[in-house]
Image (spheres, coloured by chain):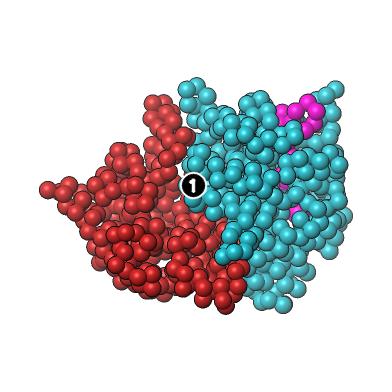
Chain colours: A red, B cyan
Amino acid sequence: MINRLIEKIRKTQAPIVVGLDPMLSYIPGFIKEKAFSEYGETLEGAAEAIWQFNKGIVDAVYDIIPAVKPQIAMYEQFGVPGLVSYKKTVDYCKEKGLVVIGDIKRGDIGSTSAAYAAGHLGKVQVGSTVCTGFGEDFATVNPYLGSDGVKPFLEVCREEKKGIFILVKTSNPSSGEFQDRLIEGRPLYEWVGEKVAEWGSTLMGEEYSYVGAVVGATYPEMGKVLRAVMPKAFILVPGYGAQGGKGADLVHFFHPDGLGAIVNSSRGIIAAYRQEKYAAFQESAYADASRQAVLDMKEDIAAALSHREA
Amino acid sequence: MINRLIEKIRKTQAPIVVGLDPMLSYIPGFIKEKAFSEYGETLEGAAEAIWQFNKGIVDAVYDIIPAVKPQIAMYEQFGVPGLVSYKKTVDYCKEKGLVVIGDIKRGDIGSTSAAYAAGHLGKVQVGSTVCTGFGEDFATVNPYLGSDGVKPFLEVCREEKKGIFILVKTSNPSSGEFQDRLIEGRPLYEWVGEKVAEWGSTLMGEEYSYVGAVVGATYPEMGKVLRAVMPKAFILVPGYGAQGGKGADLVHFFHPDGLGAIVNSSRGIIAAYRQEKYAAFQESAYADASRQAVLDMKEDIAAALSHREA
């Protein structure tokens, strides 16, 4: 799957992942009204609204991006009906040929991590039948529990040729509270990064490992260090756009050949129509605004990368 | 909710939580056969089997325990149908008067943690209606992202009078890989423990805080230190029984008055009928074996606590 992700990045010339993290407040009124008129102001109504909203965006951008990253929390908040929409979104994106990164940030003790890995990336055995739970292509994983929380994911990745991105340095303001603390003179995130490289070395695709890392765009200097610590790990970079990360901040996450990272933007793309910059788009054309925002982001990143090369 | 949990512990004289972590392999054949005959060997069939299995155990033990802890991964592995059974289990346990600790180990950046907190402990607004997603009483939370991953949970706990247990020192063998690393001479778990005490100080129930901690039974010496670091935090102690923790290991997690901790056992109780010790119970009486295992665990813990007092 990492090979496929890279192939799609090369083809689209866009190291971009669109974060499908729908908040009800982002969703145009006409979509919500239709959903609520069919299902009421219920969890089912909310779930239908986010699904229809997602579908519009996916239809508008699927040919110019390699991947999407639905954030499961935004669905899980609407209980079971929300997760039905999560699953519909995953399936639809796969049908459209997109690589799906489930932003689930799971991680637990061994047997429990094994259940998460099976449910999201692998298969479960029911009697004599093999079934698929959610079926994403990649998942994000929390490393706080150490190797035995991560290894069940590695096993499923090996079997299914899928991948994970392990949280190393997250994009949020307080990520340093524990992640930056010094251990033998080096921050915790570097130790985690070394483990990512170690875990990944046993699971290599053609150029990069099946085991990638999450490093926030909001911490470019740390990205530079981590790029060197984990040379074969693809880096998933959240925090661009709404969280404050800029194109110029991103260069350190990439290798000189322009590969090695994929940058996520959620709000900046899916709620683009609400920005002044895209005011020319009507609410009914929210998905066209998202397409334009993808094109602008692609240009911003390309400019930053070519500037570095110059 | 922490007050209610303590009241129920006092009433049952059992600082015990039953981990409802059903694996298909634990479930008696007659339950699986019935479920598969109705729903096929499908995710729905598996989900029906785990729900019926749970219901049997809950009916057999609800009057002698204060709380249950369903591990969501064991449901999530069966996709949406599995989560339907998770929700049914949560609702049924609440109907039976049990306190429900959702073992979800979520944790993300601020706005995303807010969605998890709303979906599991709080409410979501859909149009002019207020809806409930999963509705557990407590949830477990992963601290790797620092304060802004935890604070949205605190806000919901304050509003809803619910609680969280933050992962401090987990029960698994490799938990030390990051959690035990020394920062200014003290292990990371101690720093996390201090934060738990700090976060919890703003959210006090009568005797204990709404903010508790997870510390594994498998690390009793660390439990002793952490008991002192977080005097007002209730400690959720996994790892008893199947993972190797013994009654005598547990004393350090409790205060001298016998309060301050609640010990989880999953496999040891829900799959008791498969143990040699409970071989007298037929498969059809699996729930009675679970009840006996609860009574034995209660005695084991009481003996260990009274031995300390002596």
Which picture quadrant has residue A186?
A: top left
Q: Residue at x 40, y 45 (%)?
A: A171
- Which portion, as a residue range, is magenta? B252-273
Q: Please say whether residue B187 is visible from this viewpoint.
A: yes
Q: Residue furthest left?
A: A310
Q: Residue at x 26, y 63 (%)?
A: A295
Residue A93 horizontal side relative to residue B57, left or right: left
Closest to the observer, B134 or B46: B134
Q: Quadrant of the N terminus of chain B?
A: top right
Total label count? 1
Q: Residue at x 30, y 38 (%)?
A: A221
Q: Where does label 1 land, which residue?
A: B110
Closest to the observer, B72 or B96: B96
Q: Please say whether residue A269 is visible from this viewpoint.
A: no
Which three-letter amino acid code belongs to the residue tagged 1?
Gly
Residue A236 at x, y = what percent? 36, 52
Closest to the observer, A212 or B199: B199
Above or below for A84 versus B7: below
Residue B8 magenta: no
Residue B260 magenta: yes
Residue A4 at x, y = what percent? 33, 64
Which picture quadrant has residue B258?
A: top right
Residue A75 horizontal side relative to residue A2, left or right: right
Residue A77 at x, y = what percent? 57, 58
Q: Please, which chain is the residue tagged with disc 1 on?
A: B
Above or below for A303 versus A216: below
Asked which secondary structure carries label 1, the reply is helix
Residue B31 at x, y = what percent? 76, 68
Residue A297 horizontal side relative to residue A123, left or right: left
Q: Quadrant of the C terminus of chain B?
A: top right
